Amino acid sequence: MKKHPRLLSLFLFLGLFIFVIVPFIPLILSSLSFGWRWPDVFPQAWSLRAWEYVVNDGRTWQAVGISLWIALVVTSVNILLAVPAANALVRYRVRGRWLFEAIIFAPIIIPPFISVMGIHLSFLRFGLTETVLGVVLAHIAPTLPYLFRAVMISYQTLSVDWEDQARMLGAGAVPRFFHVVLPHLLPGILAGASLSVLISLSQYLITFIIGAGQVVTLPILLFPFISGGDPSVASAYSLLYAAIAIAALAGMDAALKRYYQTNRASQQEKGENA
Amino acid sequence: MWQKTKPYLLLLPAAATIILLFFGGIFDGLLKSFGYFPAIGETGFSVAAYDRLLSSSSFWESMALTLRVAALSSLLSAIIGAFIAVALFFLNDSIERTSPKPWHRLFQLPLTIPHLVAGYIMVLLFMQSGFLSRLLAAMGWIDEITDFPVLVNDPFGWGIIFAYAWKEAPFVTLMLYPVLSRIHGSWREVSRVFGAGHWQFIREIVVPVMMPAWAIATFIVFVFTFSAFEVPYLLGVTYPSVLPVYSYQLYTSGTLSDRPEALAVNVILAAITILLGLVAYYFSKRWNVLKGWG
């Protein structure tokens, strides 16, 4: 039966590799090329010109900073909104639960630009357009449902008994939250936060409508280059943008792992002391 | 009293934020699509924008393009995504469980790439002077740039479809893989005892097991591609354009009189996505696919 398991595995792995990795090759080649003429498969001349342009242009790092700042603020607000709401929906008897779920999950289904186009003129009247605050407000609806969902799943596995036990041992509401509830929710919060950051980082249209070209995030900076600008610079910017999205995710992941390691270490210490 | 109102107070900030920022915007747009626009002195209600829209051929061409692109993108993502899921399933099966599995992270890579970057990747790959065209020229299959078909910024929407297939196929895989991993190794052995080969095992066991999750995942991709803006804005043509781009073109065309029409497109889009979303939700509950989705 298993005549060529290795051959089959190799074949499957190769297919996966071509599908995922090979599309990046022209992007990398283009960012390092100097006048890449058809039909050369590889550029005749190499150059770091595009990367020098991207790295030395002050707008690049400003855009990176603003993008990350917006994503961070949006995600922090989302955490503050999502944790109590998830708590209420998972652990209390709530009348009209379906309505609350429908409200909070709606932005997953209905595209956010529909709401943003509608609210645009009101934002204009309140002076929220062309401001970072306005863009932050526009980013909340599309990102909150994902964080809410992740926290909800975490709450579902948190037994009320643990908190009751802490209460019996004399812990007040605040220590109970920080020492019992929060450590249990943290993985869920971080998983949801990664999604929230990723989604905030990749918004183009709603940032463009509300920011009106004045709030220059990475996608806003990138668009003129990829829609008919210098291909080398466009490729370098694209790679930088993708790298920052991946780095944000990897950073969250690493933070979670570190949290567990230090947590385990401190618990072992406590165990040895006792 | 406190115990009764507490959950509602806890829910209030999140629900109020979404109602104000999200539904408020949709409602605002709905009013303006009916011509209610106090800022420019219009306080009457009319369906003129919908009338003009539904009788214009460009709206219907836009609708047809949107449906075609969404249908082909979701179908292609479904096929590629299922293929990757089955491939991962067999890879895990044939390699010892102790070895690390880098491909589990590898296949998710396209999911983390922003849509605009994915779009530009497709430009570099599939444009007439793109990477694929260069490879074909190097192999002697084509002689001129113009021998390569126009696949980017083409009226049919191939570039958009390819971009979505690349980005969303891993999503389909992500939805399928947990279902597949419920298939036990013993089932495979039993099927072997009964003389089933690789293909028979896939056809008789693997496909039926993953069918419900597969259908739902495909449907979610359809709803998403139906209403997404960035990729068609970059990879499409000016006319005909998909509905979200069409709405944006109307909105930014310069005259205020076109805005109710743009917002009417949005209202129609919202209505369609809500309907599709309810269908997906109903079937996923019934088939118990989306565990943890509320």
Image (cartoon, coloured by chain):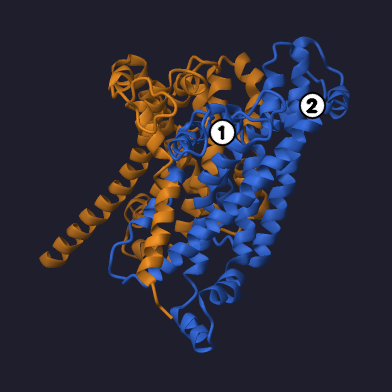
Q: Is residue B13 above or below residue A208?
A: below
Q: Which mark is residue B148?
A: 1
Residue A73 screen position, x and y as percent: 42, 31
Establish if B56 lies above or below B76: above
Q: Amino acid at mark 2?
A: Ser
Name the residue at the left extreme: A273
Check disc 1: other Cα within 10 Å, few if <14, some if 14-19, many if 20+: many
Q: Say the numbered circle drawn on residue B58.
A: 2
**Chain under numbered label 1:** B
Query: Which hue belongs to chain A?
Result: orange
Q: Position of residue B48 (x, y in %)?
A: 88, 22
Residues at badges 1 and 2 in contact (C-beta under 8 Å)?
Answer: no
| Front disc: 1 or 2 | 1
Of the two numbered discs 1 and 2 on the same chain, state the one appearing first in sequence: 2
Q: Quadrant of residue B150?
A: top right
| Left or right of residue A146, residue B52 in this image | right
Q: Residues within 10 Å of mark 2 (few under 14, many from 20)?
A: some
Q: Nearer the viewer, residue A135 or A271?
A: A135
Q: In this view of the protein, can residue A69 be seen by the observer?
A: no
Query: In blue, which chain?
Result: B
Mark 1: amino acid: Phe
Please state the horizontal and vertical placement of residue A248, each as a whole percent of the image: 35, 39
Mark 1 → mark 2, Cα distance in angstroms: 29 Å
**Residue A1 visible to an observer of this rendering:** yes
Quadrant position of the C terminus of chain B in the picture: bottom right
B181 displayed left or right of A243: right
Q: Residue at horizontal 56%, vertical 33%?
A: B148
